[in-house]
Image (tube, helix red, strand yellow):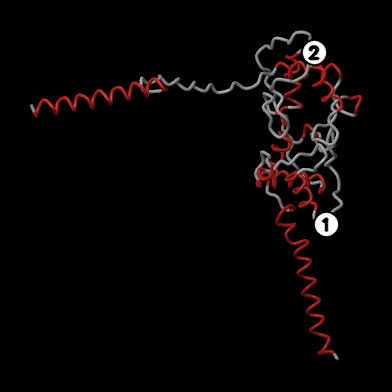
């Protein structure tokens, strides 16, 4: 009896060991033993790309709270997948290059390590605060409320991470464009205030749970409306072909006349040589 049940026990132990390795073994390699360089890179990337929505300490702002215990056997894979692919129908965009974002796999790994450092409670590098350099003085657009010069700084602090420093688009929509609306400022203001449900654009006004005051939103609107579409490369005009003397119906007639004249010259020459 003992010899017949022993192989079964050994097989069960092997299967259990394999399952434990698949579940817990890779976790140590991916997310539980980050190097100091990875944590430093993660802190930098978090400050540049994530803090504006999730807060400098992961406390949440217009995005989800990240400084928490993740209810998952493999929180590293869960966090990494969300960063890579985003969450459809929510403000969380896809950030991986594979899914159209700006971050490499190495950078996403560093971000994952840094975010999970809140869960473990270990020492972590401080998040660097992005420095926004005010642009040259901007002339306000007529009949648009708000100060575009103050708006430029607020835009750099809150919007540039998704929409690009000059509204050219990054992981968010392009803002430097011609707005097809009679009151483009009101359209832009409404989108900033209320967001776009089911899209990556969250609500930013305090009235809708965001961090920005009405005055700040007016300033951002004034700046966004002042953005000009990028200059299009001028295409050299195609030279107009000069009509040939032999083009068109008249050209055909001229060609026939020339051919007939040449034939007559040949005939006259042949007759003169015979005589």
Q: Marks 1 and 2, how far apart in space?
A: 49 Å
- Quarter of the picture containing the C terminus is top left
Would you place residue 190 above or below residue 112 in this image? above
Picture quarter containing residue 256? top left
Q: Which residue is the site of mark 2?
A: 146
Q: Secondary structure at mark 2?
A: loop
The percent coordinates of residue 225 (x first, y second) are 74, 17
Would you place residue 216 above or below residue 68 in this image? above
Would you place residue 106 above or below residue 187 in this image? below
The percent coordinates of residue 38 (x first, y second) are 67, 45
Extreme residue in the right direction: 207
Give whichever of discs 1 and 2 has the lower sequence position.
Answer: 1
Q: Residue at x 53, y 21 (%)?
A: 234
Q: Residue at x 69, y 37 (%)?
A: 44
Picture quarter containing residue 54? top right
Q: Disc 1, disc 2: CB below 8 Å?
A: no
Tell me the mark number nearer the camera, choosing from 1 and 2.
2
Residues 3 and 93: in front is 93
Residues 92 and 43: in front is 92
Would you place residue 147 above or below residue 272 in this image? above
Extreme residue in the left direction: 275
Q: Which residue is the site of mark 1?
A: 73
Extreme residue in the top direction: 142
The percent coordinates of residue 206 (x first, y second) are 89, 25
Q: Residue at x 41, y 22 (%)?
A: 249
Would residue 262 appear left or right of 23 to someone viewing this image?
A: left
Residues 158 and 228: in front is 228
Q: Residue at x 86, y 91 (%)?
A: 1
Q: Residues within 10 Å of mark 1 (few under 14, many from 20)?
A: few
The percent coordinates of residue 26 (x first, y second) are 72, 59
**Which mark, residue 102?**
none
């Amino acid at each position: 009896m003992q010899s017949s049940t022993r192989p079964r026990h050994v097989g069960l132990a092997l299967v259990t060991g394999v399952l434990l390795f698949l579940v817990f073994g890779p976790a140590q390699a991916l997310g539980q033993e980050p190097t100091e360089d990875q944590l430093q890179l993660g802190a930098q990337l978090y400050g540049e790309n994530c803090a504006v929505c999730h807060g400098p300490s992961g406390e949440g702002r217009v995005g989800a709270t990240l400084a928490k215990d993740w209810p998952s056997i493999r929180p590293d894979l869960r966090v990494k997948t969300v960063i890579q692919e985003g969450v459809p129908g929510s403000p969380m965009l896809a950030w991986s290059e594979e899914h159209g974002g700006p971050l490499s796999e190495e950078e996403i790994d560093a971000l994952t390590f840094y975010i999970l450092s809140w869960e473990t409670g270990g020492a972590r590098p401080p998040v660097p605060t992005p420095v926004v350099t005010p642009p040259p003085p901007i002339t306000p657009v007529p009949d648009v409320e708000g100060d575009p010069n103050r708006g430029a700084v607020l835009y750099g602090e809150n919007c540039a991470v998704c929409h690009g420093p000059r509204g050219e688009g990054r992981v968010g929509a392009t803002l430097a464009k011609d707005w097809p609306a009679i009151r483009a400022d009101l359209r832009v203001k409404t989108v900033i205030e209320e967001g776009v449900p089911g899209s990556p654009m969250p609500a930013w006004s305090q009235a809708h749970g965001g961090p920005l005051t009405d005055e700040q939103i007016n300033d951002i609107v004034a700046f966004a409306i002042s953005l000009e579409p990028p200059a299009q490369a001028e295409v050299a005009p195609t030279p107009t072909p000069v009509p040939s003397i032999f083009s068109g119906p008249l050209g055909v007639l001229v060609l026939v006349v020339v051919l007939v004249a040449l034939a007559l010259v040949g005939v006259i020459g042949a007759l003169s040589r015979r005589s």
